[in-house]
Amino acid sequence: MPDDVALVELLHRDLRNVTWPEPGALRATARRRSRRSAALAAVSVVVVAALTATLVDRTGAPPPSAAAVDGPGEIVAEAMLEPADIPAPTGERLGETGLAEPVRVDDLLQVCAREQGRPAEEPRSRYSRSQTLMEPPTEPATTIGTVLTQDVYRMESGTAGGFLTDLEGTVAACGAWRTTGQVYTERGMVGADVVHRWYVAASGFAGDQALLLRHEASVPPDEATGRPPGYAPSFEDRLVVRVGDLVTVLIPSGGLRTDVPGAQVTEEQVRQMARVAAERMCVAANPGC
């Protein structure tokens, strides 16, 4: 298990620096799992293999039939954020729809949930719609990263609110999760303890329910030298917002990250983006706004 967790950590943290194919190739090969880790088809097989070794089996039971459930169906495109809603420059936009997909927030958090004895099986949505907004192309074109990924899920009637409540419980259980893995140092890769901490940085700022989840990763100082052997503390944010039976997961990256030197956006701007996302979901939510 420690080796598998370390592999997931490295993928989770480092795949932002992947060299991207041309936008046309991305459209042809992008899949949901790799988008949620900000790495598209070039690494999707690796991500799936790593997570299979550590996460609960999501295929043990057949997914529910969305067509057999009464109520609103597929999520319309108008329920998604538009590039003009994003407080950072964006380029290419990729998207897809899904049926009976698992409602996914943070793969590494799911690993922690399982380690803490929390229910780690992700509920199935009835319908979903996803998009990834890429960074604007640069000259000369070298790498293209993501600015934002957004998934919107339609859940079974009455289950969406409980999902966010359960999510808060999982976050509380993973307030200080310690793993052993490989970290980068001036001497190369060395083994070290990594402390992961998830917490609710803000709540109730959009829609019917809203959470700003923050994941901090740090390496404690070396006991012998008193100096940190690895990278400085860093954090990643995820915003989870519910409107009626719809839940959206927003993952800011690139120009939307607020933890990098010289950040161009503020946390309040990111929260405002989540409020706009809630307003847009009103057109498809049940009940509506």
Image: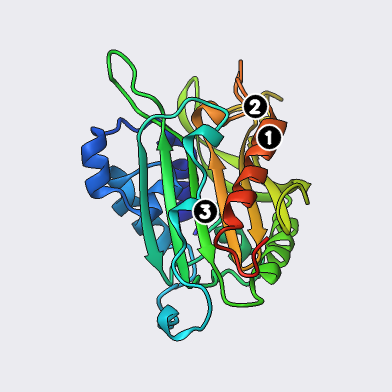
Q: How many marks?
A: 3
Helix, strand, or loop for circle 2?
A: loop
Of tags 1 and 3, the one toward the viewer is 3
- Whether residue 212 is visible, yes or no, is yes
Q: Which residue is mark 1?
A: 220
**Could you tell me how far apart the alpha carbons at marks 3 and 2 are, in whole angstroms?**
45 Å
Residue at x 46%, y 72% (from the top left corner):
73
**Could you tell me how far apart the alpha carbons at marks 2 and 1 are, in whole angstroms?**
6 Å
| Figure colour scheme | rainbow
Residue at x 45%, y 81% (from the top left corner):
64
Residue 26 at x, y percent in the picture:
27, 41
1 or 3: tag closer to the N-terminus:
3
Of 61 and 231, nearer the camera is 61
Q: Quadrant of residue 85?
A: top right
Q: Which residue type carries mark 2?
A: Pro
Q: Which residue is mark 3?
A: 79
Residue at the extreme bottom: 68
107 sits left or right of 117 in the view: left
Of tags 3 and 2, the one toward the viewer is 3
**Could you tell me how far apart the alpha carbons at marks 1 and 3 are, in whole angstroms?**
43 Å
Of 188 and 218, nearer the camera is 218
Q: Which residue type carries mark 1?
A: Pro
Q: Which residue type carries mark 3?
A: Ala
Q: Which residue is mark 2?
A: 228
Helix, strand, or loop for circle 3?
A: helix
